[in-house]
Image: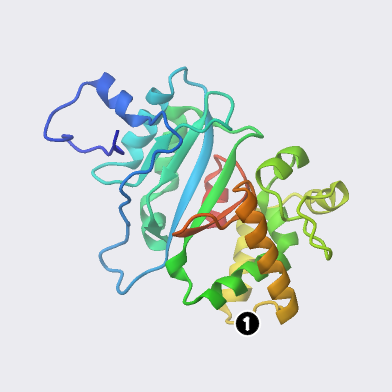
Amino acid sequence: MTDFYYGSEYDGNRLSLDELRRRSFNDSHQFKPDFTVNTLEEETGSPRTYGVELELCSRMGNRGESAFHALSILNKNRRFFYSKHDGSVSCNGYELNSHPFSLAYFEKNFTKESWDDVLNRAHYFTNQTCGYHVHISRTNFNSGESLNRFLSYLVVLRPFLLSLSNRTDIKHFNRYASFLGLSSDVRDTVQPEQFSLYTKTVLDAQRYTKRFTGSLLHEKTKPPKVEDDVLKRTVGWLKTLSGKSRYVSVNLRNSSTVELRMFAGTTDYNMITGVL
């Protein structure tokens, strides 16, 4: 099975609608396509690249048919998304995953209009077993030290990230994305009192992400200071925890990406794009 994209032909042969639906969904969670890195022609150099995993439920009875509707919109004459089985997602669900992309490419090709069309035709929704994962290419980091600094900032900014995660169920948070309740003694699970502290406030994802990127990137202000001993301790803990399981907020088991797994599953366009 290969990943599937939609042009006028596939492998030189016209396919029936049933065959299109069959090829739209990969029944193995181990499936990985030959990735296509999507960037805009006008982008120069080596733009930073990312990827997303959207764990979604569908009200349609057939996952292949649901995936067919989604991919026929998102993958017109290009390899942008693919689908595959995910046993952790209930409700007749699966993963809708992207090929690597630059932010400029994503902004141009993942539009609100196209996503609304996907929702209308694939009948997606989410429940507490769904997650939204963001992959950051390791080539985005200039060195091992820059990656370690990034990881330590995740710890410093955990209240913000916990709020942005939109997680509302502590059981599923601890099961699929432990870490953001990290306290001074480096606990690896979220404690109930910490969890409720940050989830009582109703968040506007766009407002928070704008404030976050505006203060740290656009205005060129210094990121939070992380003392060397804290950096060493937190990075070492993250790497140890990630070595034990991929069901953590920051998964370091992938050789080519750093995976952020703390976000709750969503079909909300503003949340999907705002987190990126």
Q: Quadrant of residue 227?
A: bottom right
Q: Nearer the viewer, residue 61 or 230?
A: 230
Residue 208 visible in the snapshot = no
| Left or right, residue 106 beside residue 149 | left
Secondary-structure class at tag 1: loop
Seen at 63% across and 74% down, the residue is 215
Q: Amino acid at mark 1?
A: Thr
Left or right side of 49 for 251:
right
Task: Name, please, the residue furthest toward the right.
Answer: 193
Q: Nearer the viewer, residue 26 or 269?
A: 26
Categorize mark 1 by other alpha carbons within 10 Å: few (<14), some (14-19), many (20+).
few
* Vertical arrangement, residue 247 with respect to residue 84, above or below: below
Location of the N terminus by quadrant is top left
Going 62% across and 55% down the picture, which residue do you hit? 242
Question: Which residue matches tag 1?
Answer: 221
Q: Nearer the viewer, residue 142 or 164?
A: 142
Task: Judge whether 118 appears above or below 110 on screen.
Answer: above
- Residue in the image at 53% along x and 38% along y: 55
Determine which quarter of the picture holds residue 209: bottom right
Residue toward you, 218 or 265: 265
Question: Residue shown at 79%/62% (left/top)?
Answer: 186
Give the x, y percent position of residue 160: 71, 61
Q: Going by the picture, which residue comes out furthest to the left?
A: 12
- Relative to 150, say whether 131 is above or below: above
- Could one spot residue 201 in this view of the protein? yes
> How is this picture coloured?
rainbow
What is the x, y in percent for residue 6?
A: 25, 37
Horizontal side, residue 261 vs residue 62: left or right: right
Residue 4 picture location, percent across and down: 29, 37
